[in-house]
Amino acid sequence: MPELPEVETLRRELERALVGRVIKSVKIFWSKTVQPFTPTIFAKQLKNVRVTSIERTAKILFLNLSNGKTLAIHLKMTGQLVFQSQGSTLGDFKVEPLIAGGHPEDPKKYTRAVFEFNGRAKLYFNDLRKFGWLRLVSAKDKQIMTEKYGLEPLSPEFTLANFTRALTRYPNRKLKLTLLDQTLIAGLGNIYADESCFAAGLRPRRRVKTLTDKEIKKLHRAIKQILKLALAKGGTSSRNYVRSDGSPGDFFSYLKAYGRSGQPCRRCLTPIAKIKLAGRGAHFCKNCQR
């Protein structure tokens, strides 16, 4: 699933590409993507509406529109947003949804929606697993959607004091499960929880109450550093995620723990271990993490 760095990368790229553009038409190829609207009503409400700004909360993108509505987009596990300007081609994208044959401008096998803008630009919403969604919401609905999320790690509010308060709210929880709780810390998922724990030298199954103040401070710093580097590299393309031009994110080669089960630790050569925590995989080094 795309996490904070991936969704924020898309937000920044799409902000440059879409703000000021007018939606000329919308085609929906999987009706459940836009529930509770029908594809016809959804498309009608977006026709001739201009994108005024793009925001992000946790893993949700918000395209604010000139009619006062907001288009909320959640990529879930396998969603992709690929922008095509006039005269460009979709290139050599190394993911099946975008190389399923046909003309570059044709919908692909996993394309669920296509937005056409002025200047013949297009935005493709692809989704292999069909869990992603597009919702047209009011300002009040948007507020309801966002207020349930916790601290944003990229915001000025992500101070050590606020992080400590959120982290220690459930002292008996295991560390990784706390980091994945979106009501406490918004936007972290499996990738960056594993990488942050590795960088801080903490095992993901540690009980929060066992962490010292020094360890919490180290984890706070690690989260900010890991996310900053991941953003600089355009996110992690470990599976379906691609940037808005269809190219992969470059952070994959920087991973120290996530997805490296059985491979030698980049610090000490001890094989990376993988365990299950509440049904979620967790990767760590038995030697470097305590």
Image (cartoon, rainbow, N blue to C red):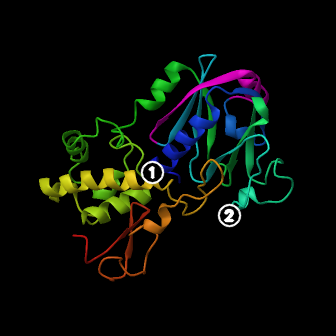
* Percent of width and height locating residue 185: 34, 44
Rendered view: 289 above or below 189: below
Outermost residue on the front side: it is 87
Residue positioned 30% across, 61% down in the render:
197
Note whether residue 36 is visible. Answer: yes
Outermost residue on the left side: it is 213
Left or right of 10? Residue 283 is left
Q: Residues within 10 Å of mark 2 (few under 14, many from 20)?
A: some
Q: Secondary structure at mark 2?
A: loop
* Percent of width and height locating residue 202: 25, 64
Q: What residue would you read off at disc 2?
A: 94
Rendered view: 8 above or below 193: above
* Percent of width and height locating residue 133: 62, 40
Residue positioned 20% across, 50% down in the render:
171
> Is 217 in front, or is 87?
87
Note whether residue 204 is visible. Answer: no
* Percent of width and height locating residue 164: 20, 45
Q: Amino acid at mark 1?
A: Leu
Q: Amino acid at mark 2?
A: Lys
Residue positioned 21% across, 47% down in the render:
168
Q: Which residues are magenta?
A: 37-58
Rendered view: 94 above or below 107: below
> Is 266 in front, or is 171?
266
The Cα–Cα distance between marks 2 and 1, rounded to whole angstroms, is 20 Å
Q: Residues within 10 Å of mark 1 (few under 14, many from 20)?
A: many
- Residue 162 on the magenta segment: no
Q: What residue would you read off at disc 1?
A: 231
